[in-house]
Image (cartoon, rainbow, N blue to C red):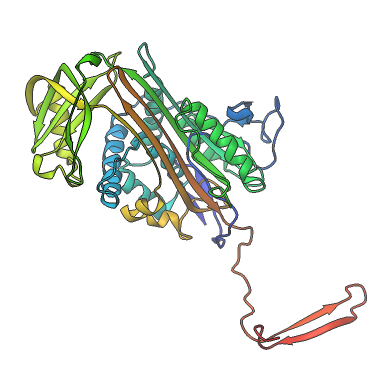
């Protein structure tokens, strides 16, 4: 039987193998293009694919990126916002009194690379939760435009570093079509690391790459225990250091009372000043704080007073109204005003597999999943690790994020096991002569 994966590549699949504790894939931002056996430095991959020196001293192989027609990344931007709000809402409901920070962009990229290898119902379930537009050539072009836009944000006063990669164990096969798809959509390369034979070493190599990509803000995302039985790792890493277009004066920062989600009053450092555009819709008030370079801005969203203690989130329509007003395209604009914004330093790390399953992606985490577009040995997602940091101060914002999405491989056995679940015989023979050395009937294996 044949399956067409979400990226349009043809994935050849036979009867589904039973899951085995043999490997998981993680998403943080690299892609492995050489499958099977390894290749040494300065040599091509086993199929002639080009190689280069990658993070943590790992040799990288690369798929062939297609030149897609020009497309707008805006549909994916809207999808990532909707996805991010959905995840934040579900996460908040599990920890309603906690500070939470995540990167919708990083999480969508890690899961998006897995999605490119999904087929049939698995791809449909993932697309619904990710709020993705229709799959096909247009999606590939949009992903390529999104990657280009992220990498174009770097400019004076603003540092943005984004990287995607696939890591794989040398013993596993990764389809060439999948490698080309992630190279096209995410500029991701592939690194071979000993995920199955030495997960501790593999974890150190991946963490070293993530730490470098996030400038040390996320020094550790994975562990040897987390990578037990992992065969592929898809990773995304994101770093931001942006100066305000209109910095706050440190002398104006004052301690004021802040009412927490738990209803307590605490003292917080409030940065005060500026004249910022604001908008109102459905009881929400939004203020846009621009960064240098005219490409980035922080939207601070204040919920209605009666909803402040819960997990209130603006609807898609409310977000559209607020953004429209701030950009002059509709909505209710309000005269520019000064703001008093608390100084914050946030950091969170979480395993999000259960949360995502609850949102409707459950099939991707079971043996019913279809990831044959990635590899004939791929079974299902077994790990979704996400970490993020956010520091907001008088001069600007420093933030980082990393995502790891893990895929479990099936074992090599294509047929279900033969189960000896009734009385059976055991015969030990000399294979050269046929002489029976031992013969037994097992009627009750629990007895001695």
Identity of the residue drawn at 66% across and 45% down: 198
Which quadrant, please, contains the C terminus? bottom right
Residue at coordinates 58% horizontally, 59% vertically from top-left?
20
Q: Position of residue 2 (x, y in %)?
A: 51, 53
- Residue 179 vs residue 108: left or right? right
Residue 194 x, y percent position in the rendering: 65, 42
Horizontally, residue 404 falls left or right of residue 296, namely right
Residue 56 seen in the figure: yes
Q: Which residue lies furthest to the right in this view?
A: 433
**Quadrant assignment, res 445:** bottom right
Residue 191 to residue 354: above or below: above
| 297, 176: nearer the viewer | 297
Q: Is residue 188 among what the camera can see? A: no
Question: Residue 227: x and y, percent?
Answer: 56, 47
- Asked whether 130 or 156 is in front, the reply is 156
Is 155 situated above or below 79? above
Front-most of residues 332 and 400: 400
């Amino acid at each position: 039987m044949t399956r067409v994966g979400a990226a349009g590549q043809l994935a050849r699949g036979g009867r589904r193998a039973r899951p085995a504790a043999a490997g998981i894939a993680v998403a943080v931002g690299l892609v492995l293009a050489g499958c099977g056996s390894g290749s040494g430095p300065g040599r091509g991959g086993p199929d002639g694919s080009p190689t280069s020196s990658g993070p943590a001293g790992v040799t990288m192989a690369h798929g062939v990126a297609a030149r897609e027609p020009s497309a707008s990344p805006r549909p994916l931007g809207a999808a990532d916002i909707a996805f991010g709000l959905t995840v934040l809402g579900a996460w908040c409901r599990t920890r309603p009194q906690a500070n939470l920070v995540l990167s919708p962009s990083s999480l969508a990229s890690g899961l998006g690379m897995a999605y490119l290898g999904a087929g049939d119902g698995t791809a449909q379930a993932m697309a619904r939760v990710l709020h993705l537009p229709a799959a096909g050539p247009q999606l590939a072009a949009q992903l390529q435009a999104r990657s280009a836009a992220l990498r174009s944000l770097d400019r004076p006063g603003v540092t943005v570093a984004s990287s995607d990669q696939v890591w794989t164990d040398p013993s596993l096969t990764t389809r060439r079509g999948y490698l080309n798809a992630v190279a096209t959509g995410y500029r991701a390369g592939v690194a071979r690391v000993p995920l199955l034979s030495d997960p501790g070493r593999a974890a150190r190599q991946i963490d070293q790459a993530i730490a470098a990509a996030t400038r040390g803000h996320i020094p550790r995302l994975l562990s040897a225990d987390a990578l037990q039985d992992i065969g592929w790792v898809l990773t995304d890493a994101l770093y931001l250091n942006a100066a305000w277009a209109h910095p706050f004066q440190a002398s104006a920062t004052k301690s004021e009372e802040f009412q927490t989600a738990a209803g307590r009053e605490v003292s917080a450092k409030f940065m005060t000043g500026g004249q910022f555009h604001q908008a109102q819709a459905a009881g929400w008030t939004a203020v846009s704080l621009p960064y240098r370079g005219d490409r980035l801005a922080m939207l601070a969203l204040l919920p209605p007073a009666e909803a402040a203690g819960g997990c209130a989130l603006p609807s898609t329509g409310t977000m559209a109204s607020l953004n429209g007003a701030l950009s002059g395209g509709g909505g209710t604009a309000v005269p520019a005003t000064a703001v008093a914004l608390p100084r914050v330093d946030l950091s969170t790390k979480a395993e999000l597999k259960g949360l995502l399953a609850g949102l409707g992606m459950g099939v991707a985490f079971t043996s019913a999943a279809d990831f044959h577009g990635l590899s004939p040995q791929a079974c299902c997602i077994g790990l979704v690790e996400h970490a993020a940091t956010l520091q907001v101060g008088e001069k600007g914002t420093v933030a980082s994020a990393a995502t790891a999405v893990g895929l479990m491989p099936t074992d090599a056995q294509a047929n279900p096991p033969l189960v000896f679940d009734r009385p059976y015989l055991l015969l030990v023979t000399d294979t050269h002569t046929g002489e029976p050395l031992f013969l037994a009937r097992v009627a009750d294996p629990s007895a001695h």
